[in-house]
């Protein structure tokens, strides 16, 4: 298939310091997002230091999809009352990593193929696990 490569599947160990073009706030956020024992208040405080990410998370919590009865204005409330820590971690990680990538440095990367493959993989995983799982546990 076009846009794919055969990369060796050897395990890769990277740290936050290996991410190019990453600000100090983004690095701290990634460290907190990666910590399984992080305190929610501490994570929320770090995310709130990043206005763009904070706005994205509170905006998502206030979206019609989540139908929160009261407006969410703090990241802490978005985590506790609406989105949950797993979703917020995923969003923070995706935004920071995505922002640090320069597409011109990887001409073989095709975001359309990547997105299509990701959706296909999610659907396949859902079909494989759906028989013994609920919607909440299908991807845990």
Image (spheres, rainbow, N blue to C red):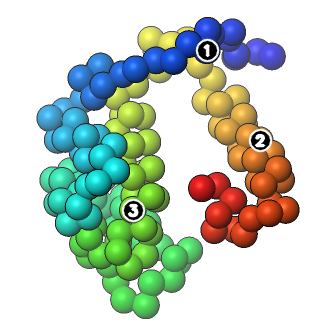
What secondary structure is marked by label 3?
helix
Mark 2 or 1, closer to the camera:
1
Residue visible at 20% across and 66% down in the picture: 41
Question: Would you say residue 45 is visible in this rendering?
Answer: yes
Q: Quadrant of residue 72?
A: bottom left
Q: Residues within 10 Å of mark 3 (few under 14, many from 20)?
A: some
Q: Quadrant of residue 137?
A: bottom right
Horizontally, residue 127 falls left or right of residue 30, namely right
Is the residue under label 3 in contact with that under label 2 (CB below 8 Å)? no
From what the image shows, is residue 120 above or below residue 106?
below
From what the image shows, is residue 61 above or below residue 139?
below
Horizontally, residue 56 falls left or right of residue 39, namely right
Q: CA distance from mark 2 to mark 3?
A: 25 Å
According to the picture, the residue beneath numbered tag 2 turns out to be 120
According to the picture, the residue beneath numbered tag 1 turns out to be 9
Q: Residues within 10 Å of mark 1 (few under 14, many from 20)?
A: few
According to the picture, the residue beneath numbered tag 3 turns out to be 85
Horizontally, residue 131 falls left or right of residue 86, namely right
| Figure quadrant of the C terminus | bottom right
Q: Residues within 10 Å of mark 2 (few under 14, many from 20)?
A: few
Residue visible at 43% across and 90% down in the picture: 69
Between 37 and 112, the residue placed more toward the observer is: 37
From what the image shows, is residue 100 above or below residue 65?
above
Residue visible at 39% across and 52% down in the picture: 89
């Amino acid at each position: 298939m076009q846009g794919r490569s055969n990369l060796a599947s050897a395990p890769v160990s990277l740290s936050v310091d290996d991410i190019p073009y990453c600000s100090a706030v983004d690095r701290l956020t990634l460290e907190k997002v990666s910590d399984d024992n992080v305190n929610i208040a501490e994570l929320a405080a770090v995310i709130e230091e990043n206005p763009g990410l904070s706005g994205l998370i509170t905006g998502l919590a206030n979206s019609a999809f989540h139908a929160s009865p009261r407006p969410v204005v703090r990241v802490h409330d978005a985590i506790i009352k609406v989105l949950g820590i797993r979703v917020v971690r995923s969003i923070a990680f995706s935004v920071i990593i995505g922002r640090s990538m320069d597409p011109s440095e990887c001409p073989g990367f095709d975001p359309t193929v990547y997105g299509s493959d990701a959706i296909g993989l999610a659907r396949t995983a859902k079909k494989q696990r759906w028989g013994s799982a609920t919607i909440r546990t299908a991807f845990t």
